[in-house]
Amino acid sequence: MATSTPAAPTGGQPHPAPARPPGKGAGSEPSRQARRTLLHRLDLGTVPYAFIAPFFLIFAAFGLYPLLYTFWISLHRVELSSMDTREWRGLANFTELFEDDRFWNALTNTFTLGVISTVPQLLMALGLAHLLNYRLRGSTFFRVAVLTPYATSIGAAALVFTMLFERDFGMINWGLGLFGVDNVDWESQKWPAQLAISLIVIWRWTGYNALLYLAAMQAIPRDLYEAAAIDGASRWQQFRTVTIPGISATIIFTIVLSTIGATQLFGEPLIFGQGPNGISGGADNQYQTLGLLLYEEGWKNYQMGRASAIAWAMFLILLLVFVLQRVLARVTSRTSRTPRTPRTS
């Protein structure tokens, strides 16, 4: 039986396109676009959080959890030998702490040591940064040299200064003896001991703060100095009216940083005490800081509840310092957004 084949279309008309199977072709373009849009939104919305998640996980494990656990311990009577046995006390550890003369003595010593070490340290750092800001030969060498004390360990620095301030054979007393000054017992007297400990802190941190000031000074536009020089301003006037306002935020930052360091002062007075007196801050607690008091309560008296209360008192002090820093930063940002050039008659 003969079969007929369809005739080719005339007039050069093309064959009709075969039907596309379902799920392919133009019908799936909206779904593909929707998937791309969803992936794009997930990329923008979740990937940044994935990158910063490790920091928050580490902070939660090693920062937030110890902080909250310390507060929980501060509400109990807990001994170091039996940490699993707790006796609820509420805020009794804090009230007893505020009634303890040793706490106020440690707080006073921490404040005086902070003032004695911070003020000269920052003034010297400001002067060093101003000198290093000039074009000097071997400026890189001097910048590395001022940072060398910061790279020295606390233990090594404290041991060296302890030998320097030794009563009978120390080099400091030997030098004072050349001027007819009798040997000073630096460790047993309050103010000599605090002065010696402050010198250790000053020696270690002056170069670090100087480099912070130097970085801030180099960010000040040179046009301001040129305009001040054209107006006839001296070096001192340029420093006072251009440099200081230009680095005011850095100055506040270093003040806060030094305050935090002074509140946590521990290694220098501990090693300076040369033995059991280091924990108690001397025979009469003449240089005992809050850090030493915390260590004495927790690891000598085994009272972890009281030690935790001291730790939280230090934390609240640092919070107060942070709030004051924010207020000062806001005030100075309003008054010194643009350093003013001095006017000379």
Image (tube, rainbow, N blue to C red):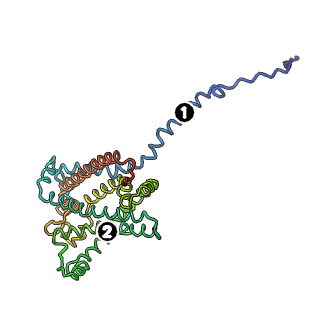
Image quadrant for the N terminus?
Answer: top right
Left or right: where 35 falls relative to 344? right
Question: Could you tell me which residue is drawn at 42 percent across and 49 percent down?
Answer: 54
Name the residue at the front extreme. 345
Number of the label disc, if any, that sits on residue 37: 1
Q: Which of 165 and 122 is in front in this view?
A: 122
Q: Nearer the viewer, residue 328 or 149?
A: 328
Residue 320 seen from this side = yes
Q: Nearer the viewer, residue 284 or 141?
A: 141
- Identify the amino acid type marked 2: Trp
How far apart in space, not on screen, are marks 1 and 2 (Cα)? 59 Å
Left or right: where 136 falls relative to 160? right
Q: Name the residue under label 2.
A: 203
In the rendered image, which quarter is residue 111 located in? bottom left
Q: Where is residue 121 in the image (x, y as percent from the top left)?
A: 30, 64
Mark 1 lies on a secondary structure that is: helix
In the rendered image, which quarter is residue 12 located in? top right
Which of the two discs, 1 and 2, labels the residue nearer the N terminus?
1
Q: Where is residue 199 in the image (x, y as percent from the top left)?
A: 27, 69
Mark 2 lies on a secondary structure that is: helix
Local crowd size for mark 2, using a 10 Å CA cut-off: few (<14), some (14–19), many (≥20): some
